[in-house]
Image (tube, rainbow, N blue to C red):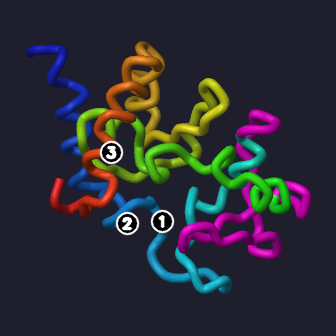
Amino acid sequence: MNTKLIPLLMLAAANIVSPAFAADENNTAPGLTAAGAPLGLHGADPVAFIDIGNRIEGTAAFTAVHDGVAYYFATRDNMNAFKRAPQKYLPQNGGFCTFGVSVAKKFDGDPQYADVHNGKLYVFLNEDIFRMYQKDKDGVIAKAEKNWAKIQHASARDL
């Protein structure tokens, strides 16, 4: 089997069993939080990823809404840091799987499989996809950045 097809086949299979939640620019959980917006990043604290390099669950007690997406934080300080500079902390590619975006698809980005690379937060569908990304981080990110401009406003179902 052509080994170049394996990542695409894995992503296609994942799309059947684990579709992205959002159809637009941000990967969010279905439904609304108490803040009146859907939850982003599965409730993980984006500031903790960037500032301390650790995945920490946030809490609804510390919520900030940015561009119609609610983000949870572990502490008030983290929430305030996000409010001061949201662009520094937002997950790249709307929180969709960066590897998926690199092949022009939108799949759920799970913060359990995340990487902070050059000060930016990238999330991935699962452990296998994350391992593939680790083999060529800069190449995957470059492809994702190029494709994100094209697919950002497209419905995940249409890709």
| Dot 1 crowding, Cα within 10 Å, few <14, some 14–19, many 20+ | many
Read off the residue under disc 2: 22
26 relative position to 158: left or right: right
Residue 134 is covered by the magenta coloring: no
Label pair 2/1, CB-CB below 8 angstroms: yes
Read off the residue under disc 3: 149
Per the rendering, the mark at residue 28 is 1
Read off the magenta span.
Answer: 50-78
User: In the image, what residue occupies the spot 69% across and 50% down?
Assistant: 46
Task: Name the residue type under label 1.
Answer: Thr
Which of disc 1 and disc 2 is earlier in sequence?
2
77 relative position to 85: left or right: right
Q: Nearer the viewer, residue 69 or 39?
A: 69
Residue 67 is covered by the magenta coloring: yes
Task: Name the residue type under label 2.
Answer: Ala
Residue situated furthest left in the rendering: 1
Task: Name the residue type under label 3.
Answer: Ala
User: In the image, what residue occupies the spot 59% across and 32% down?
Assistant: 115
Which of disc 3 and disc 2 is earlier in sequence?
2
